Amino acid sequence: MLMMVAFVAINCSPGRVLEVVKNTIGKPGVVEAYAIAGEFDAIAKVQGPDVQAISRIIADGIQTLDGVVRTSTWLVIT
């Protein structure tokens, strides 16, 4: 089955980046997560069968984590 991929940039509360990354890894649909430097504090790669699944992964699995302030999502187009 073809899977959709998206990258989710995450802004975190001060001092919470490593905690957010740790809690993002292992969530259903999250393939990878890293702390980064720049405009955003962390980035996660997510996979799902369709846009609705990607949306649920982000809304239920990432945005609800303590320490997440906001997210920005980029869908991969292949």
Image (spheres, rainbow, N blue to C red):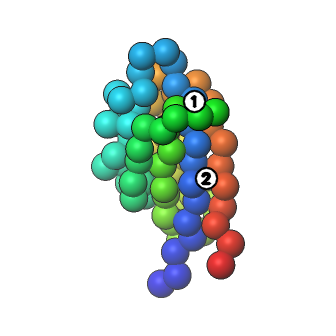
Return the residue found at the far top: 14
Q: Which quadrant is home to the C terminus?
A: bottom right
Counting from the top left corner in percent of width and height, residue 77 is at 68, 72
Q: Helix, strand, or loop for circle 2?
A: helix
Horizontally, is 75 left or right of 30 in the view? right
Which of these two is toward me, 32 or 57?
32
Residue shown at the point (48%, 38%) measured from the top left: 36
Counting from the top left corner in percent of width and height, residue 66 is at 44, 23
Which of these two is toward me, 28 or 24?
24
Residue type for callout 2? Ser
Vertical placement of residue 12 versus 31, above or below = above
State the image quarter where residue 20 is shown.
Answer: top left
Counting from the top left corner in percent of width and height, residue 35 is at 43, 38
Residue position for label 2 = 55
Q: Disc 2 to disc 1, how far (Cα)?
A: 17 Å
Residue type for callout 1? Asn
Which of these two is toward me, 63 or 7?
7
Label placed on residue 11? 1
The answer, for residue 2, to whether it is visible in the render is yes
Return the residue found at the far bottom: 1
Residue shown at the point (48%, 49%) measured from the top left: 44
Label placed on residue 29? none
Callout 2 crowding tier (Cα within 10 Å): few <14, some 14–19, many ≥20: some
Counting from the top left corner in percent of width and height, residue 57 is at 51, 51
